[in-house]
Image (tube, grey):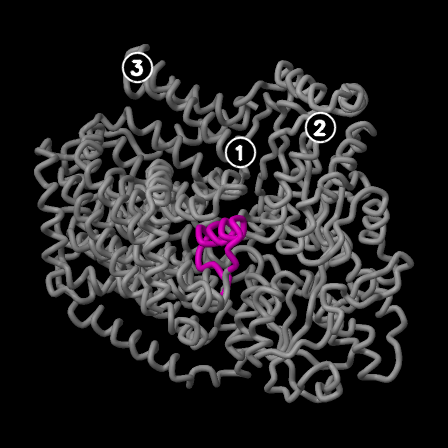
Amino acid sequence: MLEAVISALHQLATLEYLTFLVAGVAMGLAVGIFPGLGGIAGMSILLPFLYGMDPVSALALLIGLVAVIPTSDTFTSVLMGIPGSSASQATVLDGFPLAKKGQAARALAAAFSASLYGGLIGALVLTLFILVARPVILLFGTAELFMLAVLGLSMVGVLAGQSLAKGVGACGLGLLLGAIGAAPATGEYRMNFGINYLVDGIPLVVVGLAIFAVPEIIDLLRRERAIAQQDTRLGAGWLQGVKDMWANIGLATRCAGIGCLVGALPGLGGSVVDWIAYGHVVQTSKDRESFGKGDIRGVLAPESANNAKEGGGLIPTILFGIPGSGSMAVFLGGLLLIGIDTGINMVEADLDKTYVIIWSLALANVIGAGACLLLSKPVAKLTTLPYVYLAPFMIMVITFAAFQATRSWGDMLALFAIGTFAVYMKRFGWPRPPLLIGFVLADPAETNLYQAVQFYDGWNWFWRPGVLIIFAITVVSIYFGTRFAVKTTPSGGGEEGKAKTLRPQIAFTGVILVLFLFGLFDSLRRDFLGQVFPLTTAVVMLGFVLYALWIKIKGQVDHPIAYDAEVDYELRGRPEAVSAEHYLLWLAGLLALTYLVGFVLAMAAFFVLFLRVKGRAKPFIIAVLTAAAVGFLALMSHLLVLNFPAGLLQAAVDMPWPLD
Amino acid sequence: MRAQMHTTILAGAAVLGAAALMAPQVAGAADFSGKTITWTIPFGAGGGSSAWARFYVPHLSKALPGNPNIVVKNIPGGGSTKGANLWATRAKPTGLEILGTSGSTQFPYLLGDRRVKYEYKDWHVVMGTPTGGVVYVSPKLGLKGPQDLKKLRGKSLKYAAQRATSLDLVPLLSLEMMGLPVKAVFGMKSRGAGRLAFERGEVSIDYQTSSAYIKRVVPLVKAGKAVPLWTWGTFDAKGNLQRDPTFPELPHWAEAYEMMHGKKPKGPAFAAWKSFVAAGFGMQKMVFLPKGTSKDIIDTWRKAAAKAVSAPDFAKEAEKRLGKYEQVTGQAAVEGLKTAITVSPKAKAWVRNWLTKKYKVKF
C-alpha cells in the first residue's frame, strides 16, 4: 500500500497533471452552473476530446469535471430555488429561503465550505475503505438494498410538513409516477397510454425541475420584485457561512460519512443521498421549527453529503465496473477510452491509479469549492435583480435541460404537465420533496423487493442480518422523526393560509384521487408481478386522499389539510397580483410556438415578447438579452451534438443551423 | 477547406512524386473534407455501444477521404428502438449520418416488437463487429469444468436477466433446450448487474459477452470463484457452428449439449437458437447508411471501413478493446447482415410462442 501511496503522490504532483485538473474543474464549473445539465452533459461534451490524449492528462480532466459538479450546482439551488442537479435537490429546501431573506452569500459560503469538507472526508474514508470495499459491497444484496430504499422512504415522515396525510399522499404520487413504464419483473408497460415516450418512464431531471423550478419561477414572477426580499448587504454573510460550517462540523462529518456509504452502493442511486442527509439533520435536531424556512443546517447537511457521494460512487465503478449514477456511467466510459481497465486490479496492481483518482477528486474539490467561494459574493447579487429579467433565462434553461434528458418532445410536455401540477401542490400545501423521494425510490424499492423474493425463495430474505440491521435503523429513524416532533401552530390554524373557500382545493384533491384510481385500474390489467406494486400503492394512498378530501368537504378551514397559499396574497394586500394561471398560459404559449416554429425561434420570440410585455424593457436591453439566449442555445447545440425540437416550419422548409 | 485539400495534394505529390495516386480519390468517390459526420448511437453515453463507436471514430475519420470530423450522438430509450426509429425517419442519404446498432436493436426487430418502426433491409451496412459470450457457474454447484456438465442436472439454477426479449433470450433458451430448469429473475439494469448478483451468490449461473468476460470474470475464475462451461461459438462461411477463437479451450453450446445428452441438438428449437445467436452475436454491432444512399457514397464508406481495420496499429488495439474477432467489412458484411436479420417464419413463431408461454411476453 505504501508504494502505491508514494507512486500516486508522484503522479499527482506534476505541473501538467495539475494544469489539466484545473482545466477540468473550470469546465465543470461552467457546466454545473446551469441547472439540470450536470455531470452527464459535461462528461459527454468532454468524451470526444479524450481519445488520443495522454491518459494521465485525460484522467485529470475527467476527474476535475466530475468532482466539481455537485459543488457548482449549488448556485441555482440556493439563488433561484432550482435544483442544479439531482444531488442538490434537498439544498433548495433551506438554501432558497435563505436567499429570499437576503442571505444568499451566507448560504452559498456555508454550502461550499461544506462541499469542500465533505469531499475531503470522503477522500479520507475512501483511501482506507477501498481496500476492504469489495467484500463489503458484496454483502449488500437485493434484500439489503430494498431495506435501504424503505429507510429512504421513511424520511417522508420528516419532510411531510404540516400534514402527514398530505406528505404520504405526495410520496404515493411519486411512487406511482415512478411506476410508469416497463415493469421490472414482467416488462409490461404500465400507465403509458400507448405513448412510446413513457415506456422508459419519466426522467428524474424532468421531474426534479418540474416539481421545484416551475412553481418557484411562477411564484417569483407573481411577486414582481427581486428574489431577495430585503435589500441587505449581501456580502456581509460571506464569512458567517464559513463560521456556520465550522460550528456544525460534527454534523458535516456525519453527513459526509452517510454520503460516502450510500454513494458506494450500486443500485440505490445517488439521488437519495441528499434527502437522507437532510432527513438526518432534521431528526437529530432539537429545535426544528426553522427547517424549510431558511435554516443553515439544512444547507450544510446535503452539501457535505453530496460531495462525499461522488467519492463513494467511485467504488462500485472502479471495483466492479458498475456505475452508481448517470455521471459515473459516463466516467466509466471515459476510463475505458483512456485505456484504464477497471476491476479487481484497481486494488491490487493498479492501486496507485486508484489513489490518483481518489486524491484528484479531493484536490479538485478544494480548487472547485475555493473558486465557488470567491464567486459566491458577486453571483449572489443576481438575487437583487428584478426577477422579470431573469425569468426568461430560467425558463429557457429548464426547458433546455429537460429536453436534454432524452431529447424528445415528451420531455418538454412532461415538464409542463408536472410543473402545472406542482404549482397547485405548492398552493394547496402538498409537500413536494416526498413526491420526489417516492419517485426516486419507486424503482429501487420495487425491483429489489421482487428480486429478493425470487433469489431467496419467498420471504426468507427478511432474516438476513444486514436487512435486520437496516430495519432497526429505519424503526429508530421513524421514532426520532415523530417522537420529537415540534408542536408548531399548523399553518391552517392562524390567519396565514386559512382558506376562504375550499372549492378549488377540493377539486385538486379530486384530481389526485382520480390519478390514484387510474393507477388502480391500470394495475388491474397487468400480470400479478407487474401489478402488485402500483396496486398496493394506489389502494393505500386512496385511503389517505379520501381522508384529506373528507376534511375539506366537511369544511374544516382551520385544519392544516385545508391550507391555501392564495390567501397570503390577499393578506399581504396584493389581491390584484397576476394569477399563477396567467404565467402557466405564457409557458403553454411557448410550447405551442415551439410546435410551430421550432425551439430556437420560439425561445427568441418568447424573450422579445416577455421582456417587452411583462418587463417593459427597452428595445436595446431586449436585443442584448435575446441575442445572449440564442447564442447560448447555439453553443450548447454545437457542444452536445443536439438538435432542438423542430416545429412545423422546419418540416416544411430547410432552415440553417441552429434554427433547424 | 479547398485550400487545405490543395495542400494535401501538393504535399502528397511532393513526397511521393506521383500525383496520379491521389486522382481517384479526388475525382471518383465522395469526399468528406471539412464535413462533420454524425454517428447516432441509440444507447446512453456510458454503455458498450458508445465505447465501441468512440473507439472507431478516429480510425474511420483517418480512413475516410477528406478526414471528416465524426461526432457521436447518443439517443437512448426504448431499448435502442427510439434512436433507431428516429434515425430511420430523419437521416438524409448524404453519407454524413450513420447509425450504430447492436443485438438489442436486432432482437425487437426480429421478434416483431410493436415499437420497431425501422427496416434493416432499407439500410446499407458498412461494417460489423462480432463478439461472443461465455456461460459460467458457481463452483458451489460442484462442477470443475465443462467435463462435469452432467452434474448440472437436477440443480436449481437461478439466472439474473434484464428482460426475456433482450440478449438474455439466448442463455434462457439454451438452458431450456438442455432440459435445465432455470428460474429467470428479471429487472437487471445491465449484464454487469447480473454479474454482481452472481458475485453476491444470489444466482448460480451467468453469462457475459467476450470483453466483459475477459475483464471481469477471468479474475474470478483464477480465484476459484467461477467455472466457465461453454461459449455460444461462431459460424463459419457455411453457417456451421465453430469454437469461439477467443476461447478455443471451451466447447461451444452444441458440443456442450452433446456432452449432456449424447446427441446433437436439432429441430425447430435449434434452428431458432442458431438464428438468434447469429443475429445477437455474429454481427453484434453494425454501422449503417440510410435508405436511398448513392452507390458512390456506400462504396466510399465500405472502402474506408476496410482500410481502417487493415491499418497496421488497428488489430492490436482492437483486440484489447473489442476482443479477438475479425471485424467484418465489404461483401462479408453484406452477407453477415443477411444472416443476422433472416429468421425463418417457423423459427420466429417458435420463439414468440415460447416467450409467450414461458414468460408471458405479449406481442
Q: Is residue A87 left or right of residue A227?
A: right
- In the picture of the structure, the residue carrying the numbered disc 2 is B65
Q: Position of residue A526 (x, y in %)?
A: 60, 64
Q: Is residue A203 left or right of residue B236?
A: left
Number of the front mark, 2 or 1:
2
Does the segment drawn in magenta span residue A325?
A: yes
| Badge 2 density bin: few <14, some 14–19, many ≥20, Cα 10 Å | some
Q: Position of residue B8 (x, y in %)?
A: 66, 21
Q: Is residue B5 above or below residue A114?
A: above
| Picture residue at 68% right of the left edge, 46% below the top | B314
- In the picture of the structure, the residue carrying the numbered disc 3 is A621
The answer to which quarter of the image holds residue A560 is: bottom left
- Three-letter amino acid code at the position of disc 1: Leu
Co-location on one chain, circles 2 and 1: no
Q: Position of residue A597 (x, y in %)?
A: 54, 22
Does the segment drawn in magenta span residue B16?
A: no
Output the chain of dot 2: B
Q: Which mark is residue A202?
A: none
Q: Position of residue A442 (x, y in %)?
A: 45, 62
| Picture residue at 71% right of the left edge, 58% below the top | B324
User: Of residues A74 and B23, which is closer to you in this image?
Assistant: B23
- Three-letter amino acid code at the position of disc 2: Pro
Q: Which mark is residue A642?
A: 1
Residue A654 visible in image: yes
User: Of residues A269 and A17, which is closer to you in this image?
Assistant: A17
Output the chain of dot 3: A
| Picture residue at 80% right of the left edge, 62% below the top | B234
Provide the secondary structure element on which disc 3 rests.
Answer: helix
Marks 3 and 1, how far apart at CA: 28 Å
Marks 3 and 2, how far apart at CA: 47 Å
